[in-house]
Image (spheres, rainbow, N blue to C red):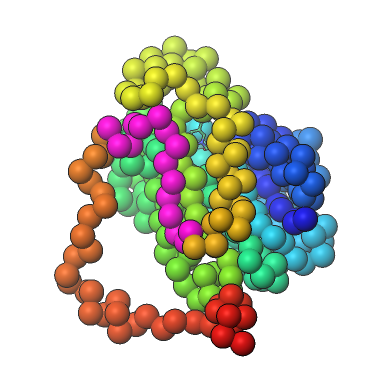
């Protein structure tokens, strides 16, 4: 049985994933604002550090996996903008950076980061905002979406999900992560019926937007079903899954982006990629060869 850290464990998909793991006999160290093993506020650097350290203390420095589900949706108010950056991006990256050695100690650890299909279905998301988030600069990210007025939080939310997805894809394939036996992937839901979505639906403006969004299967997703995907992505079946973004969104991404990917890799720079690549000795390949 494994030991898993889950942020956002008190509600919605994080809670459903924690419940499913506990029911299967695993140990879960939940992190949330309330009602969690580790009570912490991921919207501050101090809160993130305290959360990361408390999880390490409770796990004894060894983790079989982690699920980064804490997140906040678009909403009114300038403070919300900064919180979107802090929780949705730094609340993933800062924690994973601290947990990496514990995940490596797990041997075959699996990490699931909650992205969103907002990342691929929101138009006009400023590249500057994504770059700022990847550079850990919340203020610059917030400034770069102000021009969108009352839609600024929608833009920053989409930018936050692009940024975490990109961070995962850049890091998943490196020696420090893949080479240390850690598999890290993104689960990108569409509209799933959780308190986060209920809050969106409680605002007439946002509800109109959410309900008018094309969803080929119809309806909203179910938190328990998304949790089942997360648990699968934590299982041995995910040993060869590395840096993938899995959309579970009723078909919206495919509807908007049918021809956008998969795409051939551009020729420019390809030779460099081949030259730079050094196969590392992962725990698995070492075991197989030894
Ligand atoms: P939820 O609102 O039910 O749960 C999110 C949890 O994160 C809550 O327990 C909340 O207390 C926690 N959290 C928020 N701010 C925090 C902070 N500062 N410190 C510690 N914990 C904090 O949300 P849901 O829907 O389960 O979302 C889970 C993830 O899935 C989020 O990252 C969200 O962005 C993403 N997502 C959700 C979609 C949906 O339609 N529900 C769609 C696409 C992505």
The structure residue drawn at horizontal position 62% and vertical position 49%, both measured from the top left corner, is 67
- How many numbered circles are shown? 0
Above or below, 103 against 278 in this view is above
Residue furthest top as drawn: 204
Magenta-tinted stretch: 241-255
The structure residue drawn at horizontal position 22% and vertical position 55%, both measured from the top left corner, is 263
Q: Is residue 245 left or right of residue 67?
A: left
Please state which of residues 184 and 53 is positioned toward the viewer in this rendering.
184
In the image, residue 150 lies at what x, y percent? Answer: 38, 26
Residue furthest left as drawn: 267
The structure residue drawn at horizontal position 58% and vertical position 26%, both measured from the top left corner, is 194
In the image, residue 207 lies at what x, y percent? Answer: 43, 16
Above or below, 271 against 160 in this view is below
Q: Quadrant of residue 229?
A: top right
Please state which of residues 281 and 84 is positioned toward the viewer in this rendering.
281
Q: Is residue 121 left or right of residue 44?
A: left
Q: In this rendering, does residue 28 appear at all?
A: yes
Above or below, 75 against 273 in this view is above
Q: Quadrant of residue 110?
A: bottom right
Please state which of residues 124 and 281 is positioned toward the viewer in this rendering.
281
Residue furthest bottom as drawn: 290
Decide whether residue 242 is among the magenta residues: yes
Ligand 1, image quadrant it occupies: top right
In the image, residue 215 lies at what x, y percent? Answer: 36, 24
Decide whether residue 46 is among the magenta residues: no
Q: In this rendering, does residue 55 appear at all?
A: no
The structure residue drawn at horizontal position 52% and vertical position 15%, both measured from the top left corner, is 202
Above or below, 270 against 158 in this view is below
In the image, residue 21 lies at what x, y percent? Answer: 72, 44
Quarter containing the N terminus: bottom right
């Amino acid at each position: 049985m494994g030991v898993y850290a889950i942020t956002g464990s008190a509600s919605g998909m994080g809670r459903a994933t924690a419940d499913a793991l506990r029911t299967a006999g695993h140990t879960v160290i939940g992190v949330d604002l309330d009602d969690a093993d580790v009570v912490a506020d991921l919207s501050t650097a101090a809160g993130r550090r305290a959360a990361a350290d408390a999880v390490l203390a409770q796990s004894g420095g060894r983790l079989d996996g982690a699920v980064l589900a804490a997140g906040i949706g678009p909403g009114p108010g300038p403070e919300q903008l900064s919180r979107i950056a802090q929780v949705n991006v730094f609340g993933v990256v800062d924690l994973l950076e601290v947990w990496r050695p514990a995940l490596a100690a797990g041997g075959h650890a699996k990490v699931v980061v909650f992205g969103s299909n907002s990342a691929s279905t929101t138009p006009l998301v400023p590249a500057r905002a994504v770059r700022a988030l990847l550079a850990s600069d919340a203020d610059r990210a917030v400034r770069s979406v102000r021009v969108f007025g009352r839609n600024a939080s929608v833009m920053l939310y989409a930018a936050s999900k692009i940024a975490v997805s990109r961070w995962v894809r850049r890091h998943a394939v490196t020696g420090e992560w893949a080479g240390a036996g850690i598999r890290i992937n993104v689960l990108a839901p569409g509209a799933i019926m959780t308190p986060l979505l209920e809050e969106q639906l409680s605002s007439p403006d946002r509800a109109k937007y959410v309900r008018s969004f094309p969803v080929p299967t119809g309806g909203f997703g179910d938190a328990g079903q998304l949790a089942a995907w997360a648990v699968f992505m934590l299982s041995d079946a995910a040993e060869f899954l590395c840096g993938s973004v899995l959309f579970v969104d009723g078909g919206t991404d495919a509807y908007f982006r049918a021809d956008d990917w998969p795409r051939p890799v551009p020729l420019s720079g390809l030779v460099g990629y081949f030259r730079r690549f050094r196969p590392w000795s992962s725990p698995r390949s070492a075991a197989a060869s030894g």
